[in-house]
Image: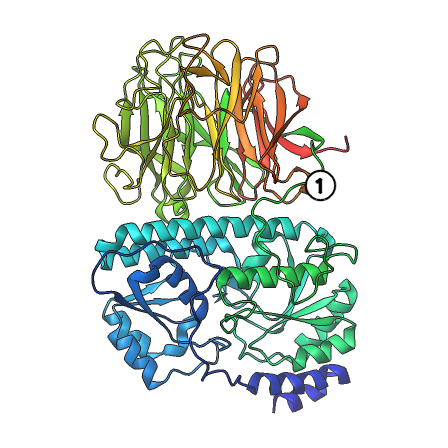
Amino acid sequence: MRVMRWLTNGLTATAMVLLVVAAAAAACRTALETQPPAAQPTSVPATAPPAQGVRLRVVATTTVVGDVVRAVGGEAIELAVLLPPGADPHTFEPTPRDAAALADADLVFINGAGLDAFLGRLLRDAIQQQKVISASDGVELRRLPGDEVDPHVWFDPLNVVIWTRNIEQALTARDPANADTYRTNARRYETALRELDAWITAQVAQVPPERRKLVTDHALLGYFVDRYGFEQVGALIPGSSSEAEPSARELAGLVDAIRELQVPAIFVGTTINPGLAQRIAEDTGARVVSLYTDSLSQPGGPADSYLALMRYDVSAIVEALAPPTSSVYPGVQPTMTVVPELAASPMPVSFPPAVAVEPAFTGFQAPVYLTHAGDPAWLFVVEKAGRIRLIEKGVVQSASFLDITDRVGSRGSEQGLLSVAFPLDFATSGVFYVNYTDLRGDTVVARYRLLQGDPRRADPASEQVILKIDQPAANHNGGQLQFGPDGYLYIGMGDGGRAGDPWGNAQNPGVLLGKLLRIDVAGQEPYAVPSDNPFVGQSGARPEIWALGLRNPWRFSFDRATGDLYIADVGQNRWEEVDFQPADSRGGENYGWDVMEGKHCFEPAAGCDTGGLVLPVAEYDHSLGCSITGGYVYRGTRYPQMAGVYFFGDYCSGRVWGLRREASGAWRIAELLQVGVNISSFGEDAAGELYMVGYNDGVIYHLTASQG
């Protein structure tokens, strides 16, 4: 026996006893296989009504995958989930009923990454029939020691966003009559996932970095560790499967690490026998905390949906690791049974926050934008002349990521390569989008691809023009591209230039100038118009329009936590403004230009009709600056006192403001600091940390909290 082989190795008696307990734990199976399938979870956003017709027969292998499939498919599908709540996919054995469900299904959704191996030959047969979809396609998989793949991808909500896209695409391909239903459901669920990610970030901020140390029953929280800045000290059972067995030496090393690092808790899944964890906890002074990991709870339980599972687990982790004075749930001493409601927009304790800027990267030529592509190691800086520069792991790369200076017209102060946007699937598709003015001065939105075999270089010859818009003047080109929470590409367009909108473009729904556009570039050539755009089907109106009445929306952004949209619209001679669109908007807002400038009549100068117009939530006059530069709502983890604040600045004066919406709906604004640079843009990295772009000095600054 394995225990006897280790007796001569000089290990401690404690380690040998733990090994015996481990063997018993590995042999133990749960008795949950006869429990009923999960009911419709109440925490999932309401789904759209389906088109008429026969519902797709869909099978999902695990309760977690099934819950996401249910959120996207809604009433348009007939869903069966093979594993019941509480079952461990590492040990589950399929029944003849499961085989029949797989045979009859139109589509089979699996977790992928090796988790569904329990289906064996049954899954191979379904694959041959081309009806198996891996939800994890496109997810960057973690590798464990021994080159084992970690299948627990759902512990990063952004991976589940990828699941959602894969599920939507598969359902749409098999059932195009319900494409609008699947798209609507998917976008709603993606918004909920991003809210979840922001909530987790805010909760984790309560745990000091030095206490973010995890010990688990098996290697299952790796994606959570990577996303939220934890350290995996070890696992009781090596590898990603709960069926593996630890050696006595491995257990002894883990016990020593727990003692040395003073790890306060051992986290054990509800599908795992806790005996081994309890014994180690007694030996080290740690406590055992239960999590829902590989399976949802029973219907009505604390983790009966994926969203509830993550809220429950994060609350338990934070409560176990945070200092004793911390509280996960304001006003309540947290316990394992408290699962707080999703706090999509956590508020800092006080406003305004004290902030500062620190130089982070230098050496750029007229930089105008900074963004990320989902990888925390990479940042991209756009230079006006037509280059995109890559910052990799804090080092500015000498070679350009993209150089299209040969086709970019940048003579005018508002012309050039103006922004870049990376879709969610960039890591797998290698596709991204840019907005620039060409040599004639017209706006071009184009798609580019990575250079084959080189992820650090894009191919200038791969350009595919998606949209081209004639510009009557050299200024007011807008230039911002952003992918919204709904997966569509948003494009900011100025009114065509000169002064006072002489062509009347901003209020004319028949032209694209002076608008915010919304198009679908996913798998469409060159693009499609979303069916729920507000001007679809209206005579004389361009269907691409999402909002109108804008002068020059140089920078706009979505709050990654709530999906709310902030638009900084550059004013004429007196007023700069911030416009706001809530996440649940159906579009069609008219932000007033050129009837209004800010909250004030412009044309006519007095007595203007404001009916139907949406006025800005903040403005400032030209005694404080001359050209607003929009920013972002802070959702990072380094500076909790900045959470929920929208930061923006002025290009001319270098002033930086903070804007926050209170729970009452009222807005508070405060000037925070003044810097001696021309602020051309703000930027956000993959973790939600914010940067400020200095146009005149070529420096990227990191926005930080200060001591005041």
Of residues 2 and 110, the one nearer the viewer is 110
Above or below — where is 645 with respect to 548?
below
Quarter of the image that includes the N terminus: bottom right
- Amino acid type shown at disc 1: Val
Model colouring? rainbow
Identity of the residue drawn at 51% across and 39% down = 559
Identity of the residue drawn at 27% across and 55% down = 172
User: 597 left or right of 253?
Assistant: left
Circle 1 — which element? loop
Residue 224, visible in the rendered structure: yes
Q: Quadrant of residue 607?
A: top left
How far across and down, in percent of the image, does residue 329 sit? 68, 55
Of residues 520 and 116, the one nearer the viewer is 520
How far across and down, in percent of the image, does residue 385 sit? 42, 20
Above or below — where is 696 with respect to 529?
above
Of residues 284 and 577, the one nearer the viewer is 577
Residue 232, visible in the rendered structure: no
How far across and down, in percent of the image, does residue 628 sit? 53, 20
How far across and down, in percent of the image, does residue 357 sit? 66, 28
The residue labelled by disc 1 is 349
Q: Quadrant of residue 515?
A: top left
Quarter of the image that includes the C terminus: top right
